[in-house]
Amino acid sequence: MLRLLLLSFVVGTATLAQDVPIAADSALSDMSIKVLMLNRITPASDTLWGVEDPQSAAEWKVFDDAAKQLIDAFAQARQGGSGNSDRKWASKAAWQTYIDEEVAALDAARQAIKLRNLEQLWEANDALYTPCETCHVEFNPGVASDDH
């Protein structure tokens, strides 16, 4: 279901009431949000949400790497991308708030990973899921074609 939510987010558009100006010198990605979601966010979030019971340092590192990849991808998403709706989405206050919440959850995930605390990691993953799902519902309430 989460994969469907992630996919539905990137292929449709919606508008919100509040706008946040993006500085004229903000470097926009050559990548669309759709491509960013499909190639970076979805695989890394699937990894993080798939945590079961890591034992070794190498196993924990896989999840820390996924969290770092997501933090980097959300920094890119914050600026927008090259898709038709990407700059419009990134200019919205709600978009920025969702990213703030996602990054805060990922910071908590990284702390849990550092402590090797599986329960805290599951809690951080739950905290990450809510803004992801809510953002998808708000910015892409269904699967609609958009040539991102």
Image: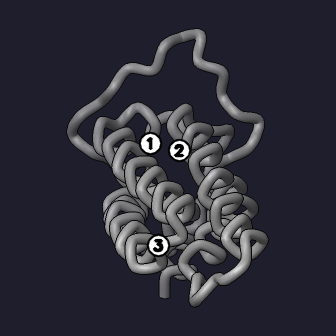
Q: Earlier in the sequence, mark 3 or mark 1?
A: 1
Mark 1 lies on a secondary structure that is: helix
Q: Which residue is mark 1?
A: 89
Residue at x-position 39% and y-position 49%? 104
Tell me the crowding category of disc 2: few under 14, some 14 to 19, or many 20 or more residues within 10 angstroms, Cα based. many
The answer to whether the residue labelled 3 contacts the one labelled 2, judged by CB atoms less than 8 Å apart, is no
- Residue 40 in the figure: left or right of residue 50: right
Residue at x-position 21% and y-position 40%? 17
- Residue 6 in the figure: left or right of residue 30: left
Q: Can residue 141 be seen?
A: no
The tag on residue 85 is 2
Amino acid residing under circle 2? Ser
Mark 2 lies on a secondary structure that is: loop
The answer to whether the residue labelled 2 contacts the one labelled 1, judged by CB atoms less than 8 Å apart, is yes
Q: Nearer the viewer, mark 2 or mark 1?
A: 1
Spatial CA span between label 2 and label 1: 6 Å
Spatial CA span between label 3 and label 2: 39 Å
The tag on residue 117 is 3
Tell me the crowding category of disc 1: few under 14, some 14 to 19, or many 20 or more residues within 10 angstroms, Cα based. many
Q: Nearer the viewer, residue 71 or 108?
A: 108
Amino acid residing under circle 1? Trp
